[in-house]
Structures are given as structure tokens and as C-alpha cells.
Image (tube, rainbow, N blue to C red):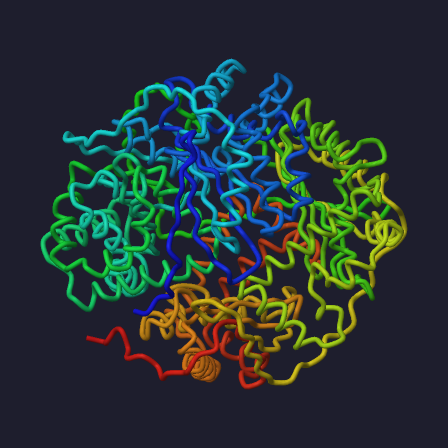
Amino acid sequence: MSTARSTALQRFTLDNGLVIYLREDHRAPLVAAQLWYHVGASQEPTGQSGLCHLVEHLMFEGSSKLASGQYDKVMAQLGGDPNAITTPDATCFPVTLAPSRLEAALEILADSMASATLGPPVFARELEVVKAERRENIDNMPLAQAHERAWILANSHTPYATPTAGHLADLQHLHQTDVRRWYQDWYHPNNASLVVVGDIDMQTLRPLVERHFATIPAGRLPERWIPAPNRRFKHRCQTIALAGLLPGAIMAFNTPSLATATNPTQAQALRLIPQLLANGSSSRLSLRKVRGEAVLLRAQARYQHLQRGDSLLTVELYANPANATAQVATDAVMQEIELLRQTAPTVDELNRAKTRLLASLVFDRDNIAVQANAIGKHAVSGLDPNLLDQERQSIESITPEDVRATAHEYLTHERLTITYMQAAPPPSAVAPTPSSNAEQNPNLSSLQGLDLNEIDITPPLVQAWQTPEGTRARLVEAHELPMVDLVLSFNAGSRLDGDKPGLAALTLFMLDEGTLSLDAVQFAEQIERLGVVYSKDITRHQAVITVRCLTGDVLDEAVRLIIDMVARPSLNAAELTPLKTQLLESSKLRQSFAVLRAREAAFSQAFGSHPFATPVRGTPTGIAAISTEDLREFHRQAYSANNLNISLVGDLSREQAEAIVRRVSAALPQHWAATAPPALPMFEAATLNLEQAGTSDAVLMLLPMSARPADPDYPALVLACDVLGGGSESRLFKALRQTHGLTYAVNAGLAPADNLLYIEWEVAGEFLDASTQLVTDVLQTYVAEGPSEAELALARRALLGELRRTVATNGSLATLIASHSHQGLPSDALATYIERLSAVTPEMARVALTLRLAPLRRLLVSVGPMVDQQGLPAPALTDQ
């Protein structure tokens, strides 16, 4: 396959040992900078898991040049997107921003390397934040727990068994002295790599790096754990039983990584095995075990080739409860693995796997941050990042016998750890979180006694009420964990911008830039001290604030701070100017992503002068014209109690929830509510081709479809759209990817609030026209004949499975009931939706599509390179 050529990777090293990598990419005025420290969770002492992650949190909470709380604000002013990542081998601090702002970011990164303060108040606050993050992202998510437990047992013979999030028992015993010692031991320039990718050259970059990093002295590093190949393995097995898990298993094989393989060919062959075995509709498991024998609902495989020590090849599978238990499904997968160990794949089969893997590498290069991540991962794994430039040739050189021989050597029973996932917990208790020095004993339990043929979804009890001020509230009590998820959804989306596009977005994003009683730094310090996590999002219809908080003593104070933010923001000019810059830089960044640019262009073309046509985050002209008085007037109206829906899920009684809702409602402005938007125009068929440098085209097809969740035929339309393009068994996926190998993914779905059906895919530029015609043909045929019984049943099972996972997690459930409230659905909408979904027949789906959709009345937008067109490639699969 043809791939875009990357510019040469450049490197230099400072006298203090800091290694700098640069790959120039001038497609957009952006640069990604990532500072990688060569230390991760695998180096943590026994009993101090989570230490590396905690230091990551503390690195930018005070230094010689920045006080605690200033880092995020400064980065926001720079228009950057700062982040931090802890892995088993490394700690990374990435940011992407305009090239003209890079020096400021580098200065901050260098200052934190030289003089992070790690003070007691910040330590105490961030320790609670890390604990809360552990609870929210792992302990409250059944599948995340299963993944963690599988990782621990599979790596039990190495320090990689230490989870990056840390064990809660260990976090509770960490001290500030541990943090300071860790920082003093490892955070030195001679233990770091700086990776820069984007719109900058070496002549510009090198002086910036030398100015800020060269004066930092090298440090003496402690003795490092050195990975050694393990020659003795023993089969291990455990069962994880948690509410919300589907019956299935995680199979993990101990394998070498690219760094530890005796021959690099083995690592590259291991990278192809997931593609052959499980990833994609033409994979062996998909063909034989999902569609053929129907013992699996789905399966996916992963192999992490970039790691200092040995790695894992994992297969995550979900049993089809109509035909198999988790153990039967696992045995079926092992049969396919054994076949691969004994018999080499065909040349055609291997080529398809190579094409998928190589395509994914091409798509990765569309994103400069992803490019930088790959370079950094090579460096911290002890590998030469220049290997990236040989990656294509290395993969293409793999033979079928290379794959068979590698599978035969490493995919053995002795190297295999199985973690069975069970759909319901044992009657006795919830599985505890193990400490880092706890012995990992197998926990075999029988699956017998479970009715695996039944799809059992018990809709939660949703309580609903309305305050005297007009706020609509919904509650689901969930007392298993001491936490609460809160969603505040104001009818304050960008459709209300009027003649100043960006007004709704700026108002929402200004809420936490200071209140009448606290400046932005004080607000951030206080709310983070409580371990509260919140986010803000703007759409055409809503301004949404989501909050996660522990219950108990901190809840009352957390609610007070959130009320202060939404009801009494200062909205001052000093904060507005830098936030405008941030919003404009964010818009530039979004425009560099072809798929996001396609969406904005499509809405503009479809809706003309309608409010929905304007970009959600505004235009440069609109943003420039917005004043603080505009913000205050918008807030007085759109953030009214009568314009608010509140949803709560968590460890609250009805009485406690009512008290919280009353406090919020009473504090807000009163007696204003948004009116319904004007009717959407019926757009005409049109095609827009927008040129943008890259390796593929992002394509978006919009078709008018007026459908609301309360409509009788809505569930039929949801299922029909899922069959069309909702997954790897959909018609579009089979046509575009399985048959012709045109794309990595395709999506189709409803956007009921916008009266649209959308179809979205990416394709090599030369196949834009051919893929568009193929999608059109598939769509017309599908509308005429409708889904089959088998297609509909599979789609229904997938949707119900997804719904089951949704209601099992507090955060996703809160989002779901918030959307129901915004749509004006009754509190029992979830229960009735399940019933309606189960009652849909193929004829109902066909009739709904025929009545609602006109497939020739389409708007097509593509964003990508303009190249000569080719016809459809030959089908990749036959019906043999």
C-alpha cells in the first residue's frame, strides 16, 4: 500500500544528558511538545504503588516561576492543551499549541524539572485527587477493574504488575517525603527525552531548548530495575464477578516486546497476529466464531510492542449467551490460536492484516501528537526512534511462516493467563482491591446456575420532580460507592448566540474563571482540594456541566462551590481576553482535523441562515465582538432556574437530592426560558470537496430524517441505522472495509435533534468517488429491502449490551437520564425504550426507513487531498 513519507527524524543531546527529538510537520501551524521522563510505575518500591502517578499530578502545582494553580491557566492563555500520562515505563507531559507559544511551554517544563515545590498543602490535596481518580476511573467501572486484575495476574512475575493508578491501600500510606525522594531521584535531564513534532525547524527549536534546559545539572540516578527474559511460566486463571460485566474473558499471553525480542521479526509478527486473529470482520474469530459458529458476540486483540520489558498479547472476548458460556467461548478462541500455531496463514490473509495495520499507521500520522507519542514510547523503551522510519518495511517483510513460528513459540498454554468475566457478582460481597504485596491466588468459580440465554437489563428507578422555580430534576439512588455524579444541563447552547457566534461557548467557559467571592486560582484550589472532578461542554442545544464528587463531609462544600460557579461567576474582562485567545486557538486546532472541519462545513451548507449553521464555538468575528456585558446578559437569561435540567446518580437519598436541587435552583437567575428553535430548513442535495493536506479524505454524508425519541417508530429507526452502519457487522462496514478494504471504520447513526441521518468514513483520496458511490448503492438497496431478521437480532443484542453497560456505571447513567430530561421524555423512558426496542420487527424497520428517508436527497462533504480518482479495488474476500 502507498503511504505518505515522513520527514527525517532529527536529534541532538545537551551536555546534561537531555535528548531532544524533532520531526518537522508543516501541514498546520501547530506543534506538539512532549517531555518524557524514563521512569514509570514499574520502578515503584513495594507498598508505594501510585507514587509515580502522584508525582505526575504534583509536577506543575508550584515551582520557582509558577505558583500552585497557575500552570493550567497559563497554558490556557497560551492556547495549549496540557496533559500528563503515567505508564509502566515512563511519565509524559504533553502539550499541543501554536509554534509562537512553544517557548513559554518549554520554559514551564524546564522550571518544573528544576524546581517543583511539592509543598504539603498541594501534596494533601492532590493525594485525595489521585484517590478519587482511582475510585472513579477504576473502582466504579467493572470492565476497568477486570482489565486491571487481568494485567496484575498476567504480570505477577515482574514489576509490571504494579498498576499505574496505584492500589488504594498504598495510596493511603504515601507521605510527602516519598514524593520528594522520588522527584529528587528521577526527575533529571539525563533521565528524560523531549519530543517535538510540528511546524518548527531545528534552527528555531535548538536555541529555545538550550536557553531553558541547558543550565539544569545532570543528576545521579538510582539503580534501575532491568528487565530480564522470563524462562519459567505457569498457566494461571481467575474469575472476576462484578455487576455490569458481560460474560467473557481476557486472555493474556506473556510475550517479548520489540525491546526484548531475540529477533525483531518476532515482535513485528506479534503485531500482525491481533489483526489476523480478532481485529476486523475478515479476522478468523469474526468469520468463524462470531458469524460462523456464533459463540462470540465480539472479540478484539491487542499487543503492546513498545515496552522496556516483556509484554502481553491479549484477546478480549464476549460470549454469545445464546450459544456459549464464557469458558466455552474461550475454548473456541484457543482452538483458533492453536490452528495458527500449527498452520501458517495464507498470503492473502496476511496481506489483509498488513494492510489494516499499515493503514492505521498512516492515519496515526495525521495527528502530530500521536507522532510525538510514538517517538517518545520508542525512547523510553530503550529503542532507537529511527526504527519508526523502517516500520513499514519491517511489517511488509513478515512472511506467513514468521507468523506461525512466532505463534507456536509464544502463544502457549503455559504462557497464558485467563481472566473470566462474570455477568453477576457472587451473593457474598464485592471483590476487594488487592494491595501491591497481596498474593494473587486463582479464584475459579462456576458459571453454572446463570441463565446465559437471557439478556437481563433491569432499568433503574428514576425519580423525577420539579422545583417551584421551574428546575426539572431526576435521581437514581446508587449506594454501593460513596460518590455522586451530577449533570447540570442548561438550554443554553450555541443556537442562542444570535449575531455574536461564540457567546454561549464563552459564557460557559468563563464560569470557572473566577466568581464574585473567589478568583480563578482560589476556586481551582478549593474544588480540587475536595477531590471534585468537573467538566464543561457546549453543543448547539445545551451547555452541560458534569460533576463527580465523593459524598460525606466534602459534598456540601463541593455543592457550594459549584453553585458559586454557575450562579455567581465574575465574568471579568481580565479573564475574557485570554479566554478568547484560547477559544480561537482551539478553533484553529479543530480545523486541522479533517473530520471536524467536514462537520462544520456540512452544517453550514445544510442550514444556511438557521442558528444551527454557525460553528458551536463561534467565529473569529463573533468572538472578537463579545463583551463582558454580553456575557452577563446571556448568563442572566440562559442560566435561569427555569432553563435547567439536573440529574443525579449516586449515594444520595431523595431528601438529600432534593436539598441539593433546591440550593442550585434558588441561587440561579429566575423566570427566563429559551424558546424552541425555528424549524430547520429542508436542504437540497449538494456536494462539497474541501482540499486539505493529508493522507486520506474524511467524508460526511447527511440525509434529512425527522425523528424524535418519543416517536412510535424511533426504536425501529435506531435499529435500522445500526444495521446500516453501527458496527463491524453492518452493511456499510462489510462493503467498505471487509469487501473492498477501503476504510478503517465507518459510522452511521441518527442525530434526532438535528433532523439528520449521518454516515461518516475515511478513505484514501483516490477512492473518494468510488467509496461514495458504493455507500450510495448500499443505502438505496438497504432502504428498499430493509434489514433481515438475523441482522436486526444482532443489532438489538449489541444495543442492549451497550445499554446494560451504560446503566451499570454511574457517570454514563447520569448522562443518559440527563439526555432524557432534556428531550422531555418521561422518567420511565428507559424501561419503555427497552420494551419498544425488543418489539421491533424487520418490517417495522423497513417501513420506518421508507417513510422517513429519501436516500437521493443527500449532502456530501469531503475534506482531504485532491488526487486523481480510481475505481473500486478488487474485493478482498470471496464467498468461498
- Residue 92 percent across, percent down from the top left: 47, 37
Q: Residue at x 34, y 50 (%)?
A: 318
Front residue of 526/490: it is 526
- Residue 516 percent across, percent down from the top left: 85, 35
- Residue 459 percent across, percent down from the top left: 55, 48
Front residue of 343/350: it is 350
Front residue of 426/442: it is 442
Q: Is residue 531 left or right of residue 508?
A: left
151 is higher (above) or lower (below) than 296: above
193 is higher (above) or lower (below) than 706: above
| Residue 661 occupies quadrant | top right
Q: Is residue 805 visible?
A: yes
Front residue of 569/812: it is 569
Q: Residue at x 68, y 27 (%)?
A: 67
Q: Is residue 61 left or right of residue 501?
A: left
Q: Residue at x 44, y 48 (%)?
A: 22
